[in-house]
Each structure stands twice: as C-alpha cells, then as structure tokens.
Image (cartoon, rainbow, N blue to C red):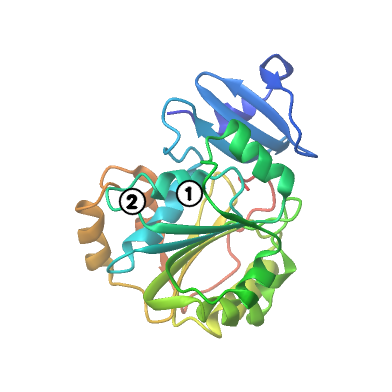
Amino acid sequence: MITFSELLSLSRPEFEHPCEVSGCRLYEAQGYRWLSSGPNAIQTAMRIDAPAFLVLPNHRAMMLAALMPSKISTVLDLGAGGGGFIRHVQSWEKAPRVSAVESNSEMLHAAREYFALAPEQLIHVGDAVDFLGRDRAHYDLVLCDLFEDRDSPAALGDELFFATLARRLNAGASVALNTLPASPEALLSIVNAARQHFGGVGIVQMTELGNVLLFLQEEPLPSEDLLRSRVAQSIYASNSEVLDALNELRRLPLELGEGVSEGGGAD
C-alpha cells in the first residue's frame, strides 16, 4: 500500500498526464492514479486495479463514522471530488444508496474520465451548503470533504451549516468531516458551530497530514466498547487508520487547539 508521502514524491513530470482540472496535475505511477493540487496536497487518488480501495489515509480514517449508525441504507457525499467514497461504499456487501455533491464540473469530468466514477451515478453540481438547504432526503451517513483552494469553506464555522446538515439526518446517523484548519482558532470555530446542533462530537488529529477529522452525531457517540465490537466484526477489522482513529478519538468536552498543524494535508 502506497503512502501519502510516496505519492507526493512520485508527483514528478515523468509521471504526469494531461489534465483538464484547473490548478491540478494528473499523475500515474506504480499502479496508482492521482490528482495533485499543490506540492503538498493530493486532491484525489485511486488504486487502478482496485478502484474501491480508499488510498488517502484521512479518507480511510473517516470510515470510523460508518460504524456509528446501527444501519446504513443512504449515504451523502459532500465534496465528491474523484469519487473515492462513492466507489468505496458501493462496494459494500449491502451497498447503500449514494447521493453526492461536487462544486467543480471539471473535477466531475475527471472523476468519470480517469477515476472510474460510474456514468449512471448522479452527482449534483453546485455548492454543498445550497444543496443542503434545498434537499429533502435524509441520510444515515454523511461524508464531508469540502475544500476551497485547500481551505475549509467559511460555512464550516457557521452554525447554520450544521443546523441544515442536522435536518438531513435519520435517527442515529453519523457525519465524518475532514478539515485542515489553519490555526487552533479556526478549528475551535468549526467545533463550536458543530456543538450547537450535535450532542456527540469527536475529534481525531492526523499528526502526519495535519488534517483534523470531526465525527458527529445528534446523540452522544457510541461507547468505545461498542465501537470496538463493531470494528472487529466489520470489513475494517484490520484497517490501521480506522483502528488508529478509534484509539485517538477525543470526545467533547475537551481542550482544543493543541497540536493543530498548518501545513501539508490531503484534501
């Protein structure tokens, strides 16, 4: 399994291919294909012989959220990017129905052209916050990976985003939110906004990448013992990132702002 650092080191001209996504470069090497949006950032990545495999470690860690609801029949992917989450959850033995939102039409084209996104998969093209305001469906799992030029959208610091998101959830649903906060204060702003509408808030700091993952439920998060039992009985039983996320999960109330990195990271 290739590491994030190895992908960055392979992002060299000899492995580059033509790409229509503004501000990104497309690479292929050692059985992987990926889009880079900067010298220290991978926008999306895919293992060519196993498209359902989640390549980026932060995305693998986010699947801890899939073990929080008692059942999952509907999934919402906010910030679909190259379609990694879509490919992954649709490979489950009991595949859920997936809705997805992507703001960048060029990225959507690349996902279908280079990243094995099925042509029949419906993707709503537009702003995720606007979509949540108009949507009337309800979901068991929301995977949120929203970035604007490597910055988390300002909406994540607005409790209205979390209020709207909470209204789209079934009972017992969970949310995994990928952030790359520029400062402890930026992280605190996001967490404080989330706490207004979610009684269960957990944080996982990914030290190597600088990403901070938030896990949200309207009720308190499942106990550690219950989550460990569900991990052991799931396809993630040997997934080191999911296990690490469970080990590192910090539940509120907690002290915020320590150890938040400003550099690097996977979008």
In which quadrant is the N terminus drawn? top left
Question: Residue, x 33% and y 66% (percent of image)?
Answer: 68
In the image, taking residue 80 as reference, residue 152 lies left or right, namely right
User: For the residue labelled by badge 1, is the local secondary structure a helix, a strand or a loop?
Assistant: helix
Name the residue beneath numbered marker 2. Answer: 243
Where residue 227 sits, quadrant-wise, is bottom left
Q: Which amino acid does label 1 sit on?
A: Ile
User: For the residue labelled by badge 2, is the local secondary structure a helix, a strand or a loop?
Assistant: helix
Residue 24 numbered tag: none
> Of the residues tagged 1 and 2, which is closer to the observer?
1
Where's residue 188, x and y in %?
A: 63, 73
Q: How far apart are marks 1 and 2 (CA)?
A: 22 Å
Where's residue 36, x and y in %?
A: 68, 35
Q: What residue type is labelled 2?
A: Leu
Q: How crowded is mark 2: few (under 14 residues within 10 Å), some or many (20 or more)?
A: many
Where residue 115 sits, quadrant-wise, is top right
Where's residue 161, x and y in %?
A: 63, 76
Question: Residue, x 60% and y 40% (percent of image)?
Answer: 44
Foreground residue, 116 or 201?
A: 116
